[in-house]
Image (cartoon, rainbow, N blue to C red):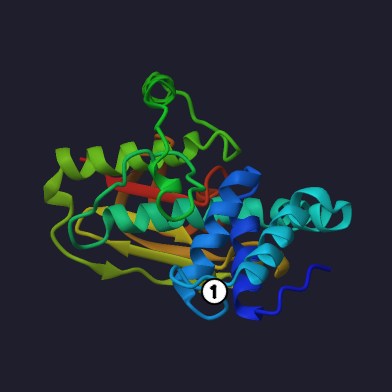
Amino acid sequence: MAALGDGPLAQLVWQAAVGAWPLTRERLHAYAEKAAREAGVSTRWIDSDTAFEQRLHALVDGVFDDPELHAGITAMADRLRPFGWSNSLSAKLIQLTAPGVPDVYQGTELWDLSLVDPDNRRPVDYPKRLELLARIDDGWLPGVDDEGAAKLLVTSRALRLRRDRPDLFTGYRPLTAAGVGADHLFAFDRGGAVTVATRLPVGLAAAGGWRDTALELPAGSWTDVLTARAVPGGWTVVGELLDRYPVALLTRDV
């Protein structure tokens, strides 16, 4: 549909377009040109190939101007978006609660579809983040949707728990799951704080969801700090535990 003559670079551009969709024409042009010159295969920063770069920019224009190509990119992005949200929440919760010292890149408290620099140096809308955080602190449980507040919920709750209860993060023990979806669950106990995350959500959906999958929690009673829901210890039905979010962060009740 839009031949370039450099297969790996074309693949990179398609992946960037889908992964950052929707994005502006200017952002994708800048990304594609930088990626091509830094690859140094078909063009370079020094002694650039003008004819190739013209084809590259025509390909980018086609993403926005060619009806069939534009529809294909949009359809692919729409198909993948919910699974991307699930992966984002899982990766963030694991990153913030696993052993080690977590960091958060400013502005990425919500979904962030930035490309490499300088695209990722665009201004951050801090007032929006403050407003969403205030709503969450008032008890709002955001949906997993375009707004991205679900990621802010996960980020704020996980960081506050690590700050306020360091005694819950003194070890690491993987937890056992059983059932048809067991391979799609990632769970560990840090010593009183339990992380539960969904992995490979596309395959999970294709297989029919969690169904009989269960997770064996340590004894006692637990609370999901994301939803304030009470969770009993022992074998827990994963489909019920993760019916609102694809992740859970549990603490043992005192």
Quadrant holding the C terminus: top left
Q: Would you say 252 lies left or right of 207 here? A: left
Q: Position of residue 126 (x, y in %)?
A: 37, 26
Query: Image quadrant of residue 51?
Result: bottom right
Q: How many marks?
A: 1
Q: Is residue 69 left or right of residue 199?
A: right
What type is the residue that disc 1 sits on? Thr
Residue 81: x percent and y percent?
A: 64, 52
Q: Which residue is mark 1?
A: 43
Indicate whether 210 appears above or below 71: below
Between 157 and 243, the one nearer to me in the picture: 157
Residue positioned 32% across, 38% down in the render: 157
Q: Residue at x 60, y 45 (%)?
A: 26
Q: Find numbered disc 1 in the image and state the secondary structure of the residue it sits on.
A: loop
The residue shown at (69%, 57%) is: 60
Image position of 89 with respect to 235: above or below: above
Residue 248 position, x and y percent, is 42, 49
In this orientation, does residue 253 appear? no
